[in-house]
Image (cartoon, rainbow, N blue to C red):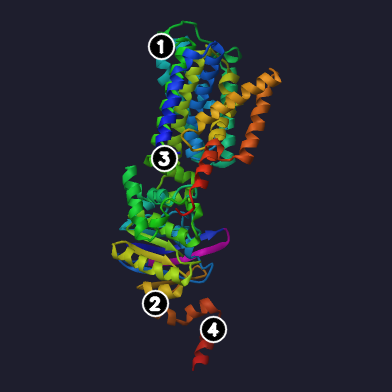
Amino acid sequence: MSAWLQRALLGASLLAALAFPLVAESGFWIKFAFTTLLFAYLGQAWNILGGYGGQFSFGHALFFGTGAYAAAIAQTAFGLNPWLGLPLGALAGGAVGWAAGYLSFRYGLRGSYFALVTLAFAEVFRILANAVPFTGAGVGLFVPLQPGWAQLQPGPIGFYYIVLALVFASLWFAWRIENSRFGAQLMAVRENEAAAAALGVDAYALKVRAIALSGAMTGVGGVLYVQFYLYIDPSLAYGPGISVEILLVPIIGGLGTIFGPLIGSIVLHAASELARRIMGDAPGIHLVFYGVLLVVMVRFLPDGLAGLLRRKRKAEVPRNA
Amino acid sequence: MLEARNVTKRFGGLVAVSNASLEVAAGSIVALIGPNGAGKTTLFAAMTGFHKPDSGSVTFDGADITGLQPHEIARRGLVRTFQIVQPFGALSVRENIAVGAHLREPNRAAALARAGEIAIRLGMGNMLDQPAATLTVAGRKRLEVARALATSPKLILLDEVMAGLNPTEIDEIVPIIRAVRDAGTTVLLIEHVMRAVMRLSERVYVLNQGRMIAEGTPQEVAARPEVVEAYLGHGAAQRIASVSA
């Protein structure tokens, strides 16, 4: 793909995305687009740590739920304006990310051990949220309905534009990371930690920074979710379903690529909507579908869909050129 | 510039390095030789923070660096390469070398430019955009050196950068190492290729079964009976002497 074509394609998709609410006839499609973009954003957050850093988290619900609860509690208990919930969610997600990173990377956990620990952290928080009173326990928390931009309840179309802006910010951020020292060192750690350390890279500090960043981004996503649905409960916030969906998106789209999470989220949500229409609304059927999809992707397309494009491009270029 | 004093490293019951000392003067090329399993790589690892010595001390540039983390030691200017090459496989040659350059250069574009310069210096200019995973063994060995050099080290530890190379490739890398030293970086190398050791190094240390058994100029060391025996077995020195007599 030439640079010119790439730019044209990018511009066209931006225009299409901006114009989408004008042509979408039903609330259903706006909601569908909101969810797709929200997970494209959350997937990008995961991608910073998992794709570029090579640290596979199976518990990003930990950050998502923490952000969601932080904003919901601040609002219901302290009357904080939900706009301030966004930075608060980032702060809470980042702090929990830092703590989780400190606790696991300090002791050299990696690979499947790290994945299991993050899963366990999220489960611990789910159980805690079920037990303590200030999260509303099993009943969950209701955010009062106060429509309007002032209370960050701008309606479906408003939410669509907010999450679209977040997706663009996250794409820009991923691009920045790919072209920075931080990103270069992060990828070096992913490829070979000992070799990176030999070149003066402090792998531990780097991974903690990456997970804190990823956690902060994910926390913001949680805030948006709670503002959209005006309700949060422990399994919505901290359940493994969220964690799995967040990690599926970049794995389908392409780990450690800028557009991977966006492509992945579009494909995942389109396919799962299609599956829902064919197979009906049987409870849990989407999880079966996710599982099958994950197996197929890991087996046949470990580089994701973006990797497929890249492979094709590479095949066109003669080796050693 | 670098001094290891009575370094011992045990793995369970096995004493890999026992009471070994060596000294590298600034601006020199020093070789560490010895048979397979003598503990050379372990000594390297103990000096660069990858293993914590059980006893003994390592001083670099006037400061005690015993037990520091590998990245801290690298930041002070003591950088190693790996005998078993460790490329960042998914990254291109240029990006690999830039990781080293980033130690002193925060700017991405400048680090990439420096990576290009170093690659050209090491004769890798035509491989810059190749993924490191597609390099040959010789290419990977060079990449190890290039990455380490990109950190602008004061002292570079080269762990068998010539193993697995053919004679032509060895003849290519010998002047490269000499040029590294001439550009101001002190060199300590582990090497089995004696032809290269004799040509390059000013001083040689011989490690056998974890102990330093000899040191001196290459010619002195090669003539020592205990060195010959370390390589060829007990009594070999005498047999050689009697054959040549």
Q: Nearer the viewer, mark 1 or mark 3?
A: 3
Checking the image for residue A183, the label placed there is 3
Magenta stretch encompasses residue A250: no
**Quarter occupied by residue B153:** bottom left
Checking the image for residue B218, the label placed there is 2
Q: Which chain does the residue under circle 3 lie in?
A: A
Q: Amino acid at mark 1?
A: Asn
Q: Main secondary structure of the magenta part?
A: strand
Side (left or right) of A67 relative to A139: left
The residue positioned 33% from the left and 44% from the top of the image is B109
- Which of B177/A208 is in front? B177
Q: Which chain does the residue under circle 1 lie in?
A: A
The answer to the question of whether label 1 and label 3 lie on touching residues, with beta carbons closer than 8 A, is no
How packed is label 2: few (under 14 Cα within 10 Å), some, or many (20 or more)?
A: many
Q: SS for tag 3?
A: helix
Q: Are marks 1 and 3 on the same chain?
A: yes
Say whether disc 4 or disc 2 marks the residue closer to the N-terminus.
2
Checking the image for residue B204, the label placed there is none
Q: Which residue is mark 4?
A: B236
- Which of B67/B89 is in front? B89
Q: Amino acid at mark 3?
A: Gly
Q: Are marks 3 and 2 on the same chain?
A: no
Checking the image for residue A81, the label placed there is 1
How packed is label 1: few (under 14 Cα within 10 Å), some, or many (20 or more)?
A: some
